[in-house]
Image (cartoon, rainbow, N blue to C red):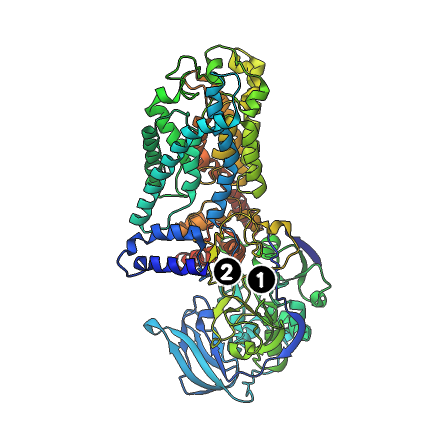
Amino acid sequence: MSTDIRIKKGLDLKLVGEADSKVSAVPRSQVYSINPSDFHKVTPKLVLKEGTEVKAGETIFYSKNDEAVKFASPVSGKIVEIRRGDKRVILEIRIQADAQDIFVDHGKKNPKEMTKEEVKAHLLASGCWPFIKQRPYDVIAHSNDTPKAIFVSGYSSAPLSADVEVALKDKVASFQAGIDALTKLTSGKVHLSVNGKSDSILNRISGVELHKVFGPHPAGNVGIQISKIDPINIGERVWVVAPQDVAIIGDLFLTGKFEANKVIALAGSEVANPQYYSVRICAQMKEIVSGKLASDNVRIISGDVLTGDKVNADGNLGYYANSVTVIPEGNYYRMFGWLPFSGIDKHSIQRTALSWLMPGKKYKADTNLNGEERAFVVTGEMEKLMPLDIYPMQLLKACLANDIEKMENLGIYEVAPEDFALIDYADTSKIEAQVIIREGLDLMINEVG
Amino acid sequence: MKFLRDKIDQIKKPFGKGEKFEKFAPAVNSLDTFLFVPNHTTKRGAHIRDAVDLKRTMITVVLALIPALIFGIWNAGYQNLSQLQEVVPFMDAFIHGLWKVLPMIVVSYGVGLGIEFYFAIVRGHDVNEGYLVTGLLIPMIMPVDFPLWMLALSVAFAVIIGKEAFGGTGMNILNPALTARAFAFFAYPTFMSGDKVWVSDATTMDAISGETILGKLAAGKEAGYDAWSMFAGTIPGSISETSVLWILVGAAILVITGVGSWRIIVSGFLGAAFTAFLFSLWGANPLMNFGMLHLLVGGLAFGIVFMATDPVSAAQTNRGKWIYGFLIGLFSILIRVFNPAYPEGVMLAILLLNVFAPTIDHYVVEGNIKRRKKRVAKQLKTA
């Protein structure tokens, strides 16, 4: 069965540096790093100490708030450093990789023949559980919950993000196995959405309710799809898994190994030949980008330009990242840059710039803020980018005021920071909408749970 | 450009973090950011940002005001000279008007920006661009002979009580420019109303009459102008309110650039037209019989296009904007017709709806909340 989702509000940003669909391998990194900051609201409790040898798939730490949730090493090797910050918060766990991986054998299994509890235990023990995220709040799912449905968005609409069709080309069988496992975990359905415009390789996946999605970004955001398919009400939980992570889960069942390989897009205007690369998660960024950049003054982003994290060249690929984007740093001055209709090479959704007259033009966007932060003044612009039935500005103000009742009434449970990424981009007053929503969600976690 | 940039960085050095004049940094920064869009890069959230900022938005409004301002300056001279001589050369009228209006603009910006800078330094935040628009609007809605010291007081009242007391730009409830006008209107009524103040020098020279059309109608007289003069704006009135033609040019700039809400503008005119039509059916006095000509006179067009669309004091939801605009139009005509003490109603109508805008939004947003609650109720029923 297939139901279509059509979205009108939003924006497809056209940027220079889209990845060519060729896939190459990235050489194996010497060091792989896990950053606990990738796992929002997780307090890590270490199991292994500095200096110990680990196998790929062996637990390094677990979550203090939900002890069943374990985090495994992506490679085999030696834990060379545990870097800590203020109050001994763990910032980074560095693993010196062996030349060849030795995997923990979790055992080949057929999810179709397993019970819910068996599947759950298998995912928890192998380190695959953190790939399952929960809405509301956009955090790792709690191991005791049973969600009312599970959502997988097989359509990535963010600018320059990795096309799921390319990334999963050789992984359809793994993806199917992953879906088979996920269907055991929910009392409801597993919803899979695909790009309505193309004939997706995921159309043949069985055991799911398939949805074709049409429309501009953020149509690919799973939260937007949830609201159209089965919106979250107070007290409800749904789970979401990213498509490549479904395939990693599938591989666990097919091979018994936690082999977290991904096909990521290396894109952006500062990449000499943007294309796809196959790489293990947590790999060193310098192995991914070295020799491939067109200039020096760049920002490397683990993820896409709207929601990704800034990383240095000695940083690493994030746990959940599906792309690496490299764009110019915008640390320059522009004389009278605020004049209306100036800056023809800059994109704006407003008609006070000329970009609306050139709808097909691709832009080389940089990190310049293009102004300074101001109080909320302009109204109506956020609504144009918000396909959810939500008043974005009112919700942001409720979050700023820590008004829990109002946040609840205005639909805080239905949103994730990524749904406000375009508002971040477009807001005249340069309001940090994603940060405000994240803080609002954190407040709800603490107060409501 | 590099040279200029280096020079500015050098000048700014004593205002940097931890330096001697750090607390004056907001003032210096605001001047600097007018020359250069700063080199700030994104720190949190989305890594790329739209080219627009509040400066660009506000300057667009100033651009939209320019046609009405230039016409207003010329008309200020024309109204005076046309009563004294047969032929009025364009430049004579313009210079006469400029001589009156320019000092008002200087005083308005000087006093207003001075206060804004002071608050920015005391509170340690950047100077907001909102006053660029407010500072120009205030002289544009005053009578031409309004004394400068009264203007300065009105500006100070509007900025301090109308805006900063609420927390500055973005937090004010009332439109600051209209707050200034309302202050002047109630504090100095003899300079703000009557049949003497609307043409320059009318108070001092008997040869010059200074009555507005609405004033005449309220007094039971004939309007005395044809519809084209009302539309073109060659009639007495506040400096820039008279020319519907040039105000509509400004409205076009606001609507095409998307800076002003077309919903408010359209619904405002609709509300006024609707009310004027109803009164013309009743037709008990000249003001009621004035019909659709109501749309061409007084401050209605200027108020709806430039004041009602102020995003801070207007309704913020799209549906709210329709209601807000319509009610402004409606109340403007209602006050004109029913309150003989105030022949012009648009100022009070907008201020009134400024106060009610949050209430309108509240009910619009409440609809969204109810939908969400209904969904839960349905869920519980089926479960």
Mark pair 1, 2: CA separation:
15 Å
Report helix, strand or loop for mark 2.
loop
Report helix, strand or loop for mark 1.
loop
Is the Cβ of the residue at disc 1 closer than 8 Å to that at disc 2? no
Instruction: Point out the residue furthest to the bottom here.
Output: A99
Quadrant location of residue A88? bottom left
Give the chain letter at badge 1: A
A86 vs A227: above or below: below
Mark on residue B46? 2
Q: Residue under circle 1?
A: A364
Give the chain letter at badge 2: B
Q: Residues within 10 Å of mark 2 (few under 14, many from 20)?
A: many
Q: Is residue A183 left or right of residue A394?
A: right
- The answer to which of A47 and B80 lies nearer the viewer is B80
**Discs 1 and 2 share one subunit:** no
A349 vs A81: above or below: above
Amino acid type, label 1: Lys
Amino acid type, label 2: Ala
- Which residue occupies 62% across, 82% down? A255
